[in-house]
Image (tube, helix red, strand yellow):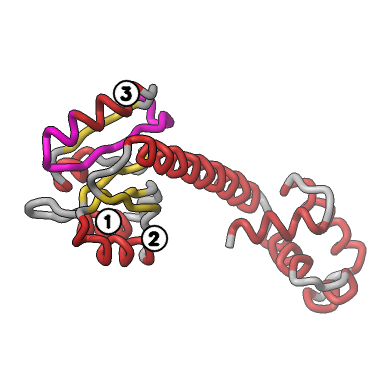
Amino acid sequence: MNEAEQIIHVVDDDEAMRDSMTWLLEGEGYAVACYESAESFLARRHPAMRGCIVLDVRMPQMSGLELHERLEALGSRLPIIFVTGHGDVPMAVSALQRGACDFIEKPFNNEDLLQRIHRALELDRQRSDQDRQHDAIAHRVEQLTQREREVMTLVVAGKLNKQIADELDISMKTVEAHRARVMEKMGVRTLAELVKAVMKLD
């Protein structure tokens, strides 16, 4: 299984629901993995998983909401779509406020579910792109010397070369040389690009 492949992880204790979802989703060309409990999903989870989770709110032992909390604590960024019964809507709304992606009420329309899954997978793609950009920028920052980092921090804070020279007790010429190396190592051409790159790290 390609770790970068987007997979729809269906976590539901109802076997008939898992089977019907697998049939629907595979029929649309999606890769699907099913789990009969929150515990079985946690046992097979790895940080590189991509895609989304379709998660039943009510399950024996660990509930869907408890799994959501556990995944948050583990730093998981997989979008979660909760599947709820009518009485579970307030719980699902609460989960949305804590970072879940969406919820859908049973019985649901297949087209409605597919639209929500499409949105969740798009969100996963965006998050994955952001993570890649963050890692690339962090790698570039690691290549900077201590002095270059100091200069970059002051440049991004809006300080002029003369102010940076005074603050670091170095010459203007040295500031200009460090600044040029920072721009080169960070792979940016303008101050605006440098500021945006540093903001992505934050």
In the figure, residue 43 lies in which quadrant?
top left
Q: In the image, residue 107 lies at what x, y percent?
A: 23, 44
Whether pointer 2 and pointer 1 mark residues with C-beta atoms closer than 8 Å, the reply is yes
Query: Residue drawn at (39%, 48%), measured in percent from left and top?
Result: 79
Distance from Cα at disc 2 to Cα at disc 1: 9 Å
Secondary element type, mark 3: helix
Look at mark 1 in the image and give the residue it sits on. 68
In the image, which disc is placed on residue 99?
A: 2
In the image, which disc is placed on residue 2?
A: none
Look at label 2 and name its amino acid: Gly
Q: Earlier in the sequence, mark 2 or mark 3?
A: 3
Characterize the local packing of mark 1: few (<14), some (14-19) or many (20 or more) Cα atoms within 10 angstroms.
many
Q: Earlier in the sequence, mark 3 or mark 1?
A: 3
Q: In the image, residue 2 lies at what x, y percent?
A: 38, 25
Look at mark 3 in the image and give the residue it sits on. 26
Query: Residue drawn at (40%, 50%), measured in percent from left and top?
Result: 77
Characterize the local packing of mark 3: few (<14), some (14-19) or many (20 or more) Cα atoms within 10 angstroms.
few
Query: Residue drawn at (38%, 41%), measured in percent from left and top?
Result: 112
Secondary element type, mark 1: helix
